[in-house]
Amino acid sequence: MPSKRACTIAGTVGFGLCKTAVSVAYMTAMGSVFSTVGFVSELDFMIPMLVSSILTSAAIVTLVAFRKLSTGSLSQAPAVLALLLGFLLSATGVLSSLPGTVLGALHGVLCGFALTVLNAVWLELFIAEADSRCAVGQIVGGLAIQCVLSSLLPLLGPLGSSLLSIAAISLSALLLGWLKRRVSFPANDDLLPRSRTDKLMLAQSYLCLFVLVGVVGILHTAVLGSQSEHLVGDVSMWMPLVAATIITALVAGLTIRRPDPTAVYKGSLPAMLVILSLLPFLGHALGGLAGLVMITCYDVCGMVFLLFIVDRARALDVSGYALSSVYFGGSSLFLIIGLGLGGLLRTLSADYGLSLLTLLAFAAIYPLAAALIMVLKKPRASSAVQQAESAQQQPADGDEKEAPSAQTVDDMLATGVDDIAERYGLTKREREILGYLARGRSAKYISDTLVISDNTTWAHIKRIYAKTGVHSKQELMSLVEHQS
């Protein structure tokens, strides 16, 4: 049996190599081009890639909704083959006689499919990790590997970059297959959490990310072919990637138990608003700084969202496949919208003699500010609803308190279980299983009672042990009794 450290290293390296190969494929159109403007290689490749990602995401969510795709069952093989095929076609040049638009579309479809599936499979593996801190460490470590390698591989030229990307995704696939055989996947098949508050938090987080993605898309295509193209054209993608990786590592260290994309968004917003407000007046003087700030904020939110997906899938017992697919599919949709709006702004500027940078500033600031208002306003409304619901329940609670009764052993155990669940951040399912363990129930009894597999039960038990720092059921029972 491999050690925990070996599995952690394998997960970190495997995820990093996977992200590297996908990043190189994204930036170089599967190795077919090496001339980029901003964060997009070529629109002939980019648009089909985004559409492919949307369709793939929709298919995954549909399969989860109809219980056709269970936790841990999504195969990486088709995505790995798609990525390998794209790089091989570029490296060999066998289809070089095709029109550039057709070849770009083919590479885009392969990349969009592979990107969506591979990220979903890797995130599901981290969700199944018994120790949440270990999962966070693997994600951050993988992003650091991506930061280094994806900056170096394009320097090797089309052939060298494609061949090493093939080696990276192949090794990553082997490591992922090895790791999947050594974990027990929890049965998290629900599309949405049950709590209205949790649903609201998810919606807010996705909204922040999607709006930012759309704004970056507007910034990109609005300046293409104009005198302001340097705003994105002068940005080396290595710089925002390094900055975003460092910031994400800091965020992960500070909020390791509850990564919050909305907090990152609110923290990034002042810098973005300042840059956008200055565009109409100092746009040419700012140069690539504007694009650098915007793309860095976009990268940070995207990276933190990976941590957020893992945390929420674990805490709310919802499908990691669904959360990651909505992330990639929604981001792709909003990026397409942003690219389209950016092109429209460029056309309006040319046809009516309007200031492009002024149009760009207004088109970007308003959605960013609107998203912030939604994030700030909704929680208060949700809190008011909760208070009203609590007030309605008070009479019934009071009636119960008026009837004197001795506190039973089960009552005391339940109190101890609740306290431990809150202290150590146990999920609802983990708290439920802890309640059975505190009463001395076996794993088999728990599986039969909750109608879940033995593997799923043991996966939850291992997480409970890891979070509470105990090593046996007896220690856990003692901890609950002491807490009671």
Image (tube, grey):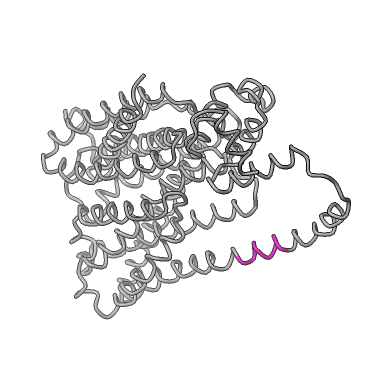
Which sits in the foreground, 414 or 301? 414
Q: Quadrant of the N terminus?
A: top left
Image position of 254 (left or right of 97): right
Q: Is the magenta stretch mostly helix, strand or loop?
A: helix
Q: Where is residue 403 in the image (x, y as percent from the top left)?
A: 89, 51
Which sits in the foreground, 446 or 75? 446
**Could you tell me if residue 136 is visible in this image?**
yes
Q: Position of residue 472 (x, y in %)?
A: 52, 28
Q: Residue furthest bottom?
A: 281
Q: Is residue 189 above or below residue 379?
A: above
Q: In this view, does 47 lie above or below 225?
A: above
Q: In which quarter of the image is the C terminus?
A: top right
Which sits in the foreground, 130 or 381? 130
Image position of 126 (left or right of 441): left
Residue 102 placement: quadrant? top left
**Could you tell me if residue 299 is visible in this image?**
no
Q: Position of residue 204 (x, y in %)?
A: 52, 58
Which span of residues is magenta-colored?
380-387
Residue 391 placement: quadrant? bottom right
Q: Is residue 4 above or below residue 296?
A: above
Q: Where is residue 220 in the image (x, y as percent from the top left)?
A: 30, 60
Magenta residue check for 466:
no
Image position of 264 (left or right of 222): right
Which sits in the foreground, 16 or 97? 16
Image position of 424 (left or right of 108): right
